[in-house]
Amino acid sequence: MNSIPGRRLIISLFLIFLLLPIYWLVNMSFKTNTEIVTTMTLWPHQPTLENYKRIFTDESWYSGYTNSLTYVLINTVISIAVALPAAYGFSRYRFLGDKHLFFWLLSNRMAPAAVYALPFFNLYSAINLFDTPWAVALAHCIFNVPLAVWILEGFVSGVPREIDETAFLDGYSFPRFFVKILVPLIASGIGVAAFFCFMFSWVELLLARTLTSVNAKPISAIMTRTVSASGMDWGLLAAAGVLTIIPGALVIWFVRNYIARGFALGRV
Amino acid sequence: MDKTINQKAWFLVLPVFLVVAFSAILPLMTVVNYSMQDTFGNNQFFWNGVGWFKELLDPSTDLGGRFLASLGRNLLFSAIILAIEVPLGIVVALSMPREGWTVAVCLVILALPLLIPWNVVGTIWQIFGRPDIGLLGYTLNGLGFDYNYVSNEFDAWATVIVMDVWHWTSLVALLCYAGLKSIPDAYYQAAQIDGASRWAVFKAIQLPKMNRVLLIAVLLRFMDSFMIYTEPFVVTGGGPGNSTTFVSIELVKIALGQFDLGKAAALSLVYNLIILIVCWIFYTVMTNAGAERPVKPGGA
């Protein structure tokens, strides 16, 4: 790749710009509230784990994390399970209305969550799923299923057709071919798609907050409530924020080489 | 790739169709239903025809004024962040290290903001920007700027824009980086033999190769910034006044705050229609770009 002048400086400055606000959050999470409010310190002078301790011992806090993870995992499993056959269908065959269907899926990925907040509230209340992880998981399908189809279609198209044909000639039935041959071949693609479903379900707040009230409340909603209720417990808020960054940071490492491809909907 | 025509493929896409239809079509019908009616509570509804739509598109009414103002603010916001994020993303992608362990480190740090829940992004900047306890606000005020995003409109806008640049420039950068990686070394060697300048290399080799990913980046960024809700809501709550109230924030205010179902539904439909049109342009351009790609000189 051809270089541009001062590239080391540019990339370093940009990375510092990205890390500074995160550093400040981590810094604050280890401070006591008195230290936060009274002094301006670049690192905690009286480091404390009190904020984290409160989150891990108070059920109303840590249940937020388990609630979030529950609907995120349900959503990821549903999305991948329905998207896999569809991705194969779109990649290999033409059928009546295929292009329209594909466009319709894309348009749902782009639809503003704010539009669906109220109707979803009505819908899931009507079928008694309100305030369960299933409501949020199903609601998040509206943008995650299209995304998974798009990403997986890109990966399936990378598998040569000859492999399908050979497998069928060898007497594989379709389901057996799918599970034994296709899925292992696009394993990395499934990983990437799962990662993106995980990610978009994890970062979304509006629908998750609208569809839950008590039992299935996600951590992000618990955070917003605490800000207003307990006034200015900045240390606790910062600690909760840091804990929401960790799952994302962990999974990035595994997909770092595929991130860009996933964001391009499998089309780089 | 040649695809065979096979109507049975519908069985493969049927699960997706059902899941998405359940989440998309049913709620959309509710919205259409509400948009034509008025309610005075007690679940009593009255037919209102296209009344809400008329009001929505008429700037002299309260609803129309609010909608058009938030739409204008939103378009301005999208334009500003695109003008910053796209060039910055290209520069960052060009500055990425070529090999070694630093590549992985850079990629992970770049991706980090993308995986933070959106309200936490808001929280981070809310804390970071506060004049009393935030590093940014404290430093700016220490340098003599009267910076306060809660009371000053300009500061609120600046904060929301810098936050979005922080949050999403990485996406543009990662996409461009993937585009740049696909350029074979031979291109650069040829350019070197020709004695091409750096600018010429960028214009003749790198930019054309990034075209496609840039297109995706621009459209994704446009769509997502056009429906931005959580981050500015957490930081500024739409204020001071209404200065950072974007369309989604206005919509949620009307729908879940005031429970003005008819107005909210009419706004939703118009909002969705705008998104749908942009989406269609996106899709057409993408599929055309895809169709052009396999064509090789000589028609092989």
Image (cartoon, rainbow, N blue to C red):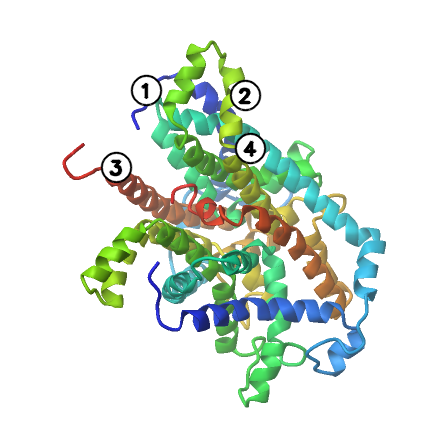
Q: CA distance from mark 2 to mark 3?
A: 31 Å
Quadrant (top left/top right/bottom left/bottom right) for the C terminus of chain B: top left
Label 3: which residue?
B294
Label 1: which residue?
B4
Residue A145 in view, yes or no: no
Residue in the picture at 35% in, 22% down: A96
**Number of residues whose C-alpha sits closer than 10 Å to that of mark 2, classed few (under 14), some (14–19) or many (20 or more):** few
Residue in the picture at 53% in, 79% down: B152
Q: Position of residue A255 (x, y in %)?
A: 54, 46
Towards the viewer: A126 or A50? A50
**Number of residues whose C-alpha sits closer than 10 Å to that of mark 4, classed few (under 14), some (14–19) or many (20 or more):** many
Tell me the kind of residue under disc 2.
Lys
Pointers 4 and 1 in contact (CB under 8 A)? Answer: no
Find the residue positioned furthest to the left.
B298
Number of the label disc, if any, that sits on residue A180 = 2
Label 4: which residue?
A80
Q: CA distance from mark 1 to mark 3?
A: 18 Å
Q: Nearer the viewer, mark 1 or mark 3?
A: 3
Do the residues at discs 1 and 3 belong to one chain?
yes
Tell me the kind of residue under disc 1.
Thr
